[in-house]
Amino acid sequence: MEKEVKIMALIRVNFMAQSLHRTVPLMVCLPTDKVDSAGQTPTGPFKTLYLLHGLLGSEVDWVSGTRIQRWSDERNLAVVMPAGENGFYTDHPWSTDLYSQFIGQELVAFTRRSFPLSTKRRDTFIGGLSMGGYGALINGLRFHETFGAIIMLSAALMTATALDKATKPAWFAETPAYLKHVYGPDLAAVRQSELNPQILLQRLLAEQVALPAIYIAIGNDDGLKGVNDEFDAFLTQHQIKHVYETGPGNHEWDFWDRYLLRALNWLPLDTRAAGINSGHIG
């Protein structure tokens, strides 16, 4: 009987993030303890997906809510899942929390120093759900020289919508206090700022930069479908290459689990590179 070998390494990391002025936790999936049928263990450099959680979430969400650990193992993909708190992954110079700088620069540099990750743009991807979908888009575009692809699941592309609801907030994320925490003290200027993805994209198009590939998915019953439909129309109007998929589901883990797999199949990854791991015994 062959010796059983556990599934890919799942590593919890805490490191001092200078852009946030505190220690930040993250989870990392690495296929470095997998053994293939020839007895070989992959050594990298690995293609890498930075996955951002949603509002009220944490760095453990993707591992507990989806099958990302198994799927990344099968594809020899490293996955980095940082804690983003409730900051929408944007820079907050008014409070010195530079989340965008953290995601697009410091986190990438730290993980590349610490793990055998590819430094090539074509091997580096960013994705997220809800708040994290917005964060993946904004930072994937801002740091387009780093990220070759963007995955947006049920993305909270609600900049204008949230501002409209600020006069009659239904929950804390629509209150003026929270919106100012995310977008800054001058809420009137946000619509025409680069925190609005359409404004950011218009600038990048004018500069003729090479945009990352974009994958978008949203459930038919999701309250954010309207803003995602509008964004799809904007991308189509400006001839920006992208994939837009809709299907049964709401703002829920069942939908994100299904469409994360579709997004991984869309990425240029190794096909079914599974080796011997937990449950595989001779």
Image (tube, helix red, strand yellow):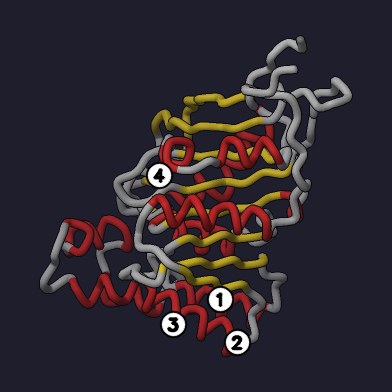
Residue 84's disc is 4
Dot 4 alpha-carbon crowd within 10 angstroms: few under 14, some 14 to 19, many 20 or more: many
Q: Nearer the viewer, residue 124 or 151?
A: 151
Label 2 residue SS: loop
Residue 176's disc is none
Dot 1 alpha-carbon crowd within 10 angstroms: few under 14, some 14 to 19, many 20 or more: many
* Above/below status of 22 relative to 145: above
Q: CA distance from mark 1 to mark 2?
A: 9 Å
* CB contact under 8 Å: marks 4 and 3: no
* Above/below status of 259 relative to 197: above
Dot 3 alpha-carbon crowd within 10 angstroms: few under 14, some 14 to 19, many 20 or more: few
Is 155 left, or right, of 110 in this rendering? left
* CB contact under 8 Å: marks 4 and 1: no
Q: CA distance from mark 4 to mark 3?
A: 26 Å
Is 272 left, or right, of 171 in this rendering? right
Residue 160 spot, x, y in % from top left:
32, 76
Of the numbered discs 4 and 1, the one sitting upstream in the chain is: 4
Label 1 residue SS: helix
The residue beneath circle 3 is 230
Label 3 residue SS: helix
Residue 238's disc is 2
Q: CA distance from mark 4 to mark 1?
A: 23 Å
Of the numbered discs 3 and 1, the one sitting upstream in the chain is: 1
